[in-house]
Amino acid sequence: MTPDLNSRIAIWRQKAIQGTLTEEETKEAIIALRAGRVSAHMASDNSRRKKAIAEVTNADDLLGELGEM
């Protein structure tokens, strides 16, 4: 998160506590916070995908090991 976003979150939080957060500010907060989650989600998906690809074993090798038993 950027320092600007952290500052805006602190302001939104304070206004929410005071009950003065407007509907427009609420929408702005939701959009800003979701944008961060989308980025995290995409990074997580990419990480999982790379990990899964690395762990896939060649099927021919597996079958060859069975024949050796």
Image (cartoon, helix red, strand yellow):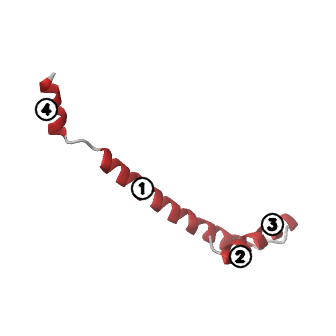
Read off the residue under disc 2. Answer: 24
Kindly state the secondary structure of the residue where label 4 is placed: helix
Residue closer to the observer: 32 or 27: 32
Read off the residue under disc 3. Answer: 16
Q: Is residue 65 above or below residue 27?
A: above
Kindly state the secondary structure of the residue where label 2 is placed: helix
- Where is residue 30 drawn, in percent x and y? 65, 67
Query: In 3D space, how far apart are the residues under numbered discs 4 and 1 (Cα atoms)?
Result: 30 Å
Q: Is residue 16 above or below residue 62?
A: below
The residue located at (24%, 41%) in the rendering is 57
Residue 47's disc is 1
The residue located at (16%, 37%) in the rendering is 61
Choose the circle earlier in sequence order: 4 or 1. Answer: 1
Read off the residue under disc 4. Answer: 64
- Where is residue 10 drawn, in percent x and y? 76, 70
Choose the circle earlier in sequence order: 4 or 3. Answer: 3
- Where is residue 8 drawn, in percent x and y? 72, 75
Q: Confirm or deny contact between disc 1 and disc 3 (CB under 8 A).
A: no
Q: Amino acid at mark 3?
A: Ala
Query: In 3D space, how far apart are the residues under numbered discs 1 and 3 (Cα atoms)?
Result: 35 Å
* Marks 4, 3: nearer the viewer: 4
In the picture, measured across the screen, residue 48 lies left or right of residue 11, that is left
Other-residue count near label 2 (Cα within 10 Å), few / some / many at <14 / 14–19 / ≥20? few
Q: How many marks?
A: 4
